[in-house]
Image: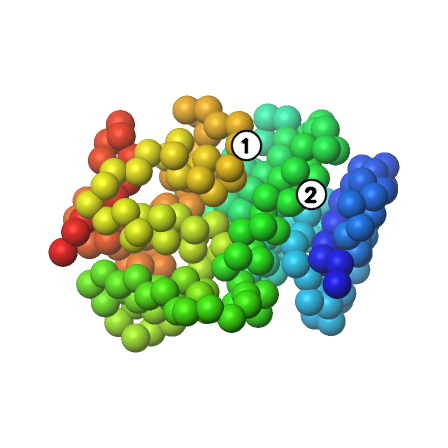
Amino acid sequence: MPDKILVVDDEAEIADLIETYLKNENYTVFKFYSSQEALACIQTVEFDLAVLDVMMPEIDGLTLCQKIRAQYTYPIIMLTAKDGELDKITGLTLGADDYITKPFLPLELVARIKSQLRRYKQYNPQRLGEGDKDILMHLGLVMNTTTYECSLHEKPIVLTPTEFAILRILLENKGRVISAEELFHRIWQDEYYSKSNNTIPVHVRHLREKLNDTLNQPKYIKTIWGVGYKIEET
């Protein structure tokens, strides 16, 4: 069954262009020029990924992202203005998994979408095949890498695919420092990374909030300044 992708952008030319490229890749596309129309569809269709423009009238893309993330864990890619650094940070904080800056190359967006879908299918329990359960544990934190379930002191934690991937890598490498660059490449594979990229730090900050962790006295994710992140061995 083709993956279902939600595309929301009030600029018809851009939305239509994205739709054309995604249909050429055999995706099923649900295209809307307003967030209001998209919201009604979100309640009735089980999407695999959403592409949202930040700047839209009435309900902007950041608000729409927040509404989606309150109910669903599928990946969200934000389309931001050329100098929209604040939009990028805000979008990641609200639960977006990635962003791409306008103007963009359609094939780059398609590549980002494929990368996000690969991880979503890998970590989403409804899309996993049969296999042995793989349990990772640390100080009351329990992660099941087969069923994509995570709990802290027996209370479930809802993680986005990106958050899950980061936490899994750190748990699988306890005691070892993992740089932001390595995390980025392992999650997004061959996608471009620069030292100014704040994607990983924002997701780590969001993870800490869900783990009730602190930066100064971390119990789970420790920052090694100028090097990266690690979870201590117990």
Q: Which mark is residue 161?
A: none
Q: Viewed as shown, does residue 156 lie left or right of 78? A: left
Q: Is residue 59 above or below residue 151?
A: above
Q: Position of residue 6 (x, y in %)?
A: 73, 54
Q: Viewed as shown, does residue 210 lie left or right of 232? A: right
Toward the left, the furthest residue is 234
**Number of numbered discs on residues:** 2
At label 2, the amino acid type is Asp
Q: CA distance from mark 1 to mark 2?
A: 21 Å
Callout 2: few (<14), some (14-19), or many (20+) C-alpha neighbours within 10 Å? many
Callout 1: few (<14), some (14-19), or many (20+) C-alpha neighbours within 10 Å? few
Q: Position of residue 182 (x, y in %)?
A: 38, 34
Q: Is residue 118 above or below residue 199?
A: below
* Residue at the (59%, 44%) spot, across then down: 115
Q: To which residue does mark 1 refer?
A: 191
* Residue at the (68%, 47%) spot, across then down: 51
Toward the bottom, the furthest residue is 154
Q: To which residue does mark 2 refer?
A: 53
Location of the N terminus (image quadrant): bottom right
* Residue at the (68%, 61%) spot, across then down: 47
Q: Position of residue 41 (x, y in %)?
A: 76, 65
Colour scheme of the rendered structure: rainbow
* Residue 54 seen in the current view: no
Marks 1 and 2: which is nearer the front? 1
* Residue at the (64%, 26%) spot, across then down: 82
Instruction: Describe the element under mark 1 as helix, strand or loop.
Output: loop
At label 1, the amino acid type is Glu
